[in-house]
């Protein structure tokens, strides 16, 4: 099972790097495992001048899950440039469901991943 937990940690790492890259300085994350599902809850503030980087976030995170991409590329999560959205596409292919709520100062993301 530790293999799946490493993937969860990489997802949280990438989201953290992404939000640092867009001015986040109040970041929190939570991982809950329930039987065969994990829920990642992630909250961060961001620099309003970089809000445009959030425009496609929900679309990126709700891409169709691709197990073959996940199996090959999950270890690359976290290696992108801070604030770049390309790594969010990979996260989207790793999770089963994503919900993104963008407020004026904060973003809350809930990701669901089958284990």
Image (cartoon, rainbow, N blue to C red):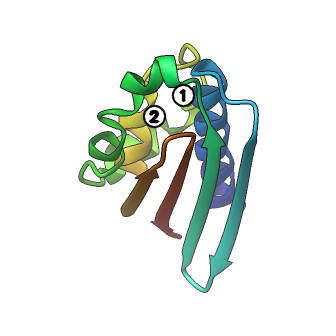
Within 10 Å of disc 2 (Cα), the crowding (few <14, some 14-19, many 20+) is few
Task: State left or right for residue 75 relative to residue 104.
Answer: right
Location of mark 2 (residue): 73
Label at residue 76: 1
Within 10 Å of disc 1 (Cα), the crowding (few <14, some 14-19, many 20+) is few
Question: Which residue is at 66% across, 35% downward?
Answer: 16
Residue farthest to the front? 104
Residue farthest to the top? 81
Q: In terms of secondary structure, where does tag 2 sit?
A: helix
Residue 50 location (% of width, % of height): 48, 19
Between residues 54 and 13, which one lies in front from this camera angle? 54
Q: In terms of secondary structure, where does tag 1 sit?
A: helix
Question: Which residue is at 24% across, 53% downward?
Answer: 64
The Cα–Cα distance between marks 2 and 1, rounded to whole angstroms, is 6 Å
Between residues 51 and 31, which one lies in front from this camera angle? 51
Task: State left or right for residue 38 relative to residue 91.
Answer: right
Residue 20 location (% of width, % of height): 67, 25
Label pair 2/1, CB-CB below 8 angstroms? yes
- Would you identify the image quadrant in which residue 101 lies? bottom left
């Amino acid at each position: 099972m530790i293999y799946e937990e490493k993937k969860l940690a990489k997802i949280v790492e990438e989201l953290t790097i992404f939000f640092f890259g867009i001015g986040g300085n109040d970041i929190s994350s939570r991982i809950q495992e329930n039987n065969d599902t994990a829920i990642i809850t992630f909250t961060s503030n961001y620099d309003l001048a970089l809000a445009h980087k959030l425009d496609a976030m929900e679309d990126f995170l709700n891409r169709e899950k691709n197990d073959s991409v996940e199996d090959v590329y999950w270890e690359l999560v976290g290696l992108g440039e801070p604030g770049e959205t390309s790594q969010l596409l990979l996260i989207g292919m790793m999770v089963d469901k994503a919900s993104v709520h963008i407020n004026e100062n904060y973003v809350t993301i809930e990701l669901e991943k089958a284990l």
